[in-house]
Amino acid sequence: MENKLRMSEDEVLDRAVQAVKWSLEYTDDVEFSAEDAVRSEINFLVKVFNAVIKAGAKTINVPDTVGYSIPGVWGERMKTLIHEVEHASKVVWSTHCLPHLSILPNKYQSDLLKNVFISMNNILQILNNIPIMQ
């Protein structure tokens, strides 16, 4: 964060909350997406997600921006986030991952995870209503 965004964790947190509040001036359905969530510290993501949900975000997107994760690890990360975020049941959970790493094992799927976005050859395919067939 400090190298790419030139901001501290507190500054990123403040900007995220400000962005949600600003967006709510134009719509009542705000989706917050944490860029490069796969390489972010899980405790920081929980802190950010708690703050943006409190600010009014209705969808939380957890992207694997660079295709770094593997299915089991990604599924466990999603499960941990959904478990640790205070008001997880009040928002829609979404993830975005690359095709070869995108299918979450059944044991990690959750009723709260509603959308999985899979990038394939520059085409965004949207799969709704988990479970996804393996």
Image (tube, helix red, strand yellow):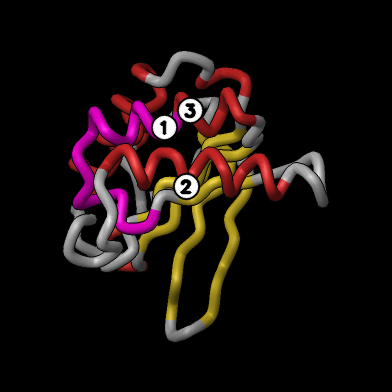
Q: Amino acid at mark 3?
A: Ala
Q: Which mark is residue 15?
A: 2
Marks counted in the figure total 3
Viewer-side residue, 44 vs 91? 44
Classify mark 2: residues with Cα within 10 Å, few (<14), some (14-19) or many (20+). Answer: some
Q: Residue at x 24, y 28 (%)?
A: 43
Question: In the figure, is residue 107 to the left or right of 15?
Answer: left
- Magenta region includes residue 48: yes
Q: Which secondary structure is most common in the magenta stretch?
A: helix
Q: Which mark is residue 51?
A: 3
Q: Is residue 76 visible?
A: no
Question: In the figure, is residue 126 to the left or right of 47?
Answer: right
The answer for how far apart the CA atoms under marks 2 and 3 are is 11 Å
Residue picked out by circle 1: 109
Q: Residue at x 53, y 16 (%)?
A: 87
**Residue stretch rendered in magenta on the structure:** 35-49
Viewer-side residue, 7 vs 74? 7
Classify mark 3: residues with Cα within 10 Å, few (<14), some (14-19) or many (20+). Answer: some
Viewer-side residue, 29 vs 14? 14
Q: Secondary structure at mark 1?
A: loop
